[in-house]
Amino acid sequence: MVILVGMCAGSLVHNRPPANIFMGDSGALLLDLILTVVRRTRAGKHPWAPDALHLHHSMIHLGHSKRRAVLVLYFWAALIAFIPVLMSVTTQHQPCILAGRGSPRP
């Protein structure tokens, strides 16, 4: 675990502007894999054994169907992706209107 913290801390030091390195998708997936293996090992389970701790499993346990859980996840992913795109194509005053605060005062 100390090695993992050291790797992340080292990455953060070199990730300040102007960034020399960044973790990227592969690094984030590797970090998730390592944390999952550590979590399962500490719980006394085999590291590669499946579990029901993923978000879609939690949603199914809350009463959503598999189809509805996927649709809810798709909705949130689309919403989270849409907001920055919308903000990048709007003028300076429009994001205030979209946030429900009305137009900004001069």
Image (cartoon, rainbow, N blue to C red):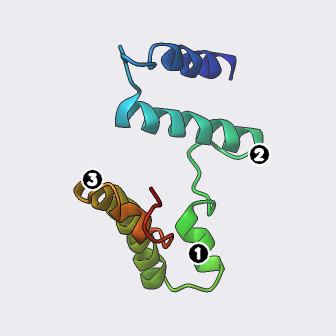
Q: Amino acid at mark 1?
A: Met
Name the one closer to the observer, 82 or 62: 82
Q: Residue at x 40, y 74 (%)?
A: 75
**Going from the N terminus, do you reach mark 3 or mark 2 first?**
2
Are dots 1 and 3 in contact, CB under 8 Å? no
Q: Residue at x 51, y 69 (%)?
A: 101
Q: Residue furthest front?
A: 106
Q: Amino acid at mark 3?
A: Ser
Numbered label attached to residue 59: 1
Q: CA distance from mark 1 to mark 3?
A: 32 Å
**Going from the N terminus, do you reach mark 2 or mark 1 first?**
2
Can you identify the residue that label 2 sits on? Answer: 43
Q: CA distance from mark 2 to mark 1?
A: 22 Å
Badge 1 element: helix
**Mark 2 crowdedness (10 Å alpha carbons): few <14, some 14-19, many ≥20:** few
Residue 29: percent from left, percent from top:
44, 39
Are dots 3 and 2 in contact, CB under 8 Å? no
**Going from the N terminus, do you reach mark 1 or mark 3 first?**
1
Numbered label attached to residue 88: 3
Residue 22: percent from left, percent from top:
39, 24
Badge 3 element: helix
Name the one closer to the observer, 11 or 44: 11
Quadrant the C terminus occupies: bottom left
Rendering quarter of residue 47:
top right
Residue 55: percent from left, percent from top:
56, 64
